[in-house]
Amino acid sequence: MATTIATGPAPGSNAGGVSGEHMESKPLGNERLRVAAVFSHHMVLQRRKPIPVFGEGKPGTSFTVELKPQIPALLSESVSSPEVHTSSSYHAVVHGTVDEHGQWLVVLPAMDSGKTYRLIVSAQDIRLEYRDVLIGEVWIASGQSNIEFELHNALDGESEVALATDGNIRFFNTPKRGALGDELFEDENASSWQVCSPATAGYMSAIAYFFARKLRSQWPDVPVGIVDCYVGGTSISCWMSEKTLRATQYGNAYLERYEQQIAGKSLESMHEAMAQWQKVFDQWNADIARAQLVQPDIDWDTLNTQYGECPWPPPMTSFSQFRPTGPFIAMVSRVAPYAIRGALWYQGEEDEQYGSSYAAMLRDMIADWRTLWNIDALMASDSNNLLQSDEHDAIRSASPLPFVIAQLPQWIDKKQYVAHQDPMLWPVLRQAQSDVTHDTNDVYLTVLMDCGEFNNIHPVDKKTPGERLALTALRHVYEQHSIVADSPRFRDTLQLNDTQSPVIGVIFDTADGMHFMHDDRRIASEAVESKDEALSDFDVLRKSITQIARLLTARGSVTEPISSQTSEQQFDEWFRPRNASGFEVAGEDGDFHQAAAMSLTLKSDAVDGGFACIVLYSPNVPQPRFVRYGYFSWGPVPVFNSAGLPAEPFNTYRR
């Protein structure tokens, strides 16, 4: 079995998710009436959707929730965001009663952006007033370390933080806990929405920041709010309900592994073990931060040699945020059903050993979250026991909360690369992520195959992923169809009528202007072919173009075939040798070999976004039947469309 590489937390991230420095205290209420922690001054409420307001209290307590325009003079002097003015005003009032379980939820009517508001929750002798409330677009950003990675640590982080002056971008850092209890409640009391500024933006998810900034560039008058809800080093099982995990063999396996890890341990011994680990971990983090401050360009090999590798994983405990269901209970369920437009999901690294079940787990997790955010069902049911009730299965797909999935980029550990040992684990996860977006409604994929870093599981360029996620949301969630957001995607293979042909074609959709870009990544286990070998492959492919063109024309495509004369320009523009194409082909035996590739541009008015064909050849596979692209941990991925989006990896061979 391949060695598991610890993913761990994002370097330099806030371990608890709460930083009191720059936070304004919020009204907390008391045991008679409390509002959920996600409500505070400076919050952003979702526009054009019903607005749930919820919390806890003494059963039978009657209360009123009111949303009213704010008088400008009441704005805090510390708030630097400009108020978005409008000629209209709006005032909504709803009444409610705390139920027998001590929970309450009311729903304000949908509203549009345009004014600054106050949210007031009051009972007989209680008045909780939240100021500087905006209406806009709200997204939850969740997963593990690469979405946890904070802006101050990202590429050009110092300058990006200094330029983060848009006060209509706001964020809420959900406290990072894995169990209900006093520690969580204290963190929740200290948590608060923050207005984006050079003093605060550094502690926001870098990907979520660039996502929000891209949305703001599309709608300058619409505020954007981000609910940061992530924990580095978490498995997908951490973000799911116990009911859902227990329902399947693959889900229950996560719980069984967890139960074995804590078997025989007392609560006292678990707290002691965690405290000892935390001391070691904090010291390691401090050493790393100090070394990076002295030498900003220091590499991880040097750091690991000097200070040892990250002390990961932490000891498993019954209260850990790394245990199955932990963050679902203590984070997601504490935020839901705060009104959001959709979810950004960047996760999978921690589940690399269980890739065969990842697609099913991801579908189940999405269904869990959609249950939590199903407002109609929550209003009609006993919301406190929804995920434990028989109604759960009946309504789990009724509320299609959109998900935008960040597909894992490329990455390989240096030791594995040097040893020519590609573990081939992440390709399975990428395929699983792709499969879910193909077969699950309102789930969309953002391809990041060109965004990874060699020997660094936490690539520092977070601007590219953040902006691509925003493009995906704009096109598919907001239905701005003029925006190009989709990567070239495999549609079909094309085989010549001659079954003995040594070439095979691959047809891509959303491939307008598809072309080869330079990419010098190589798979270490493969030898670099000679120039003569490359020219020989080129000649085989060039001679097949006429036959391929006839087949495509018969399918209704208009082709633009290249000249039959070999030239250096053609070689550079339309051809990639075996070790630089990213493609592999196999015969019926499923034994894959690298393939040379030649691009053929196609046009069809019937295909949205254009499509293209790439013809493949390998002298080691005389009768190719199967194709895969980008199916490795680290290697060349030169295929892009005219929008600069990398082709989605794929594999037509399924055992």
Image (tube, rainbow, N blue to C red):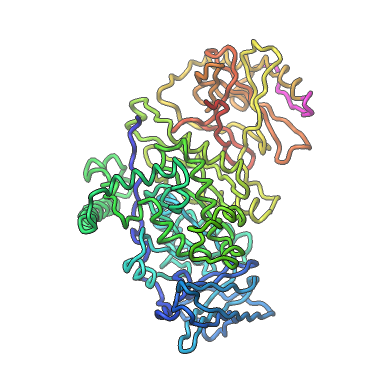
The quarter of the rendered structure image containing the N terminus is top left
- Magenta extent: 553-565
Count the numbered circles shown.
Answer: 0
In this rendering, the answer to whether 624 lies above or below 451 is above
Q: Give left or right: position of 574 versus 196.
A: right
The furthest residue to the bottom: 125
Quadrant of res 214 = bottom right
The furthest residue to the front: 390
Residue 301, x across and y down, in percent? 29, 39
The reply to whether residue 326 is visible in this rendering is: yes
Q: Residue at x 29, y 44 (%)?
A: 260
Quadrant of res 474 = bottom right
In this rendering, the answer to whether 229 lies above or below 39 is above
Residue 328, x across and y down, in percent? 43, 57
Q: Residue at x 49, y 66 (%)?
A: 384
Residue 409, x across and y down, in percent? 47, 40
Viewer-side residue, 540 vs 53: 53
Secondary structure, magenta segment, majority class: loop
Viewer-side residue, 501 vs 527: 501
Q: Residue at x 59, y 56 (%)?
A: 395
Quadrant of res 555 = top right
Residue 90, x across and y down, in percent? 65, 80
Q: Give left or right: position of 239 versus 16.
A: right
Is 45 colored magenta in this rendering? no
Q: Give left or right: position of 135 versus 171.
A: right
Is 560 colored magenta in this rendering? yes
The reply to whether residue 593 is visible in this rendering is: no
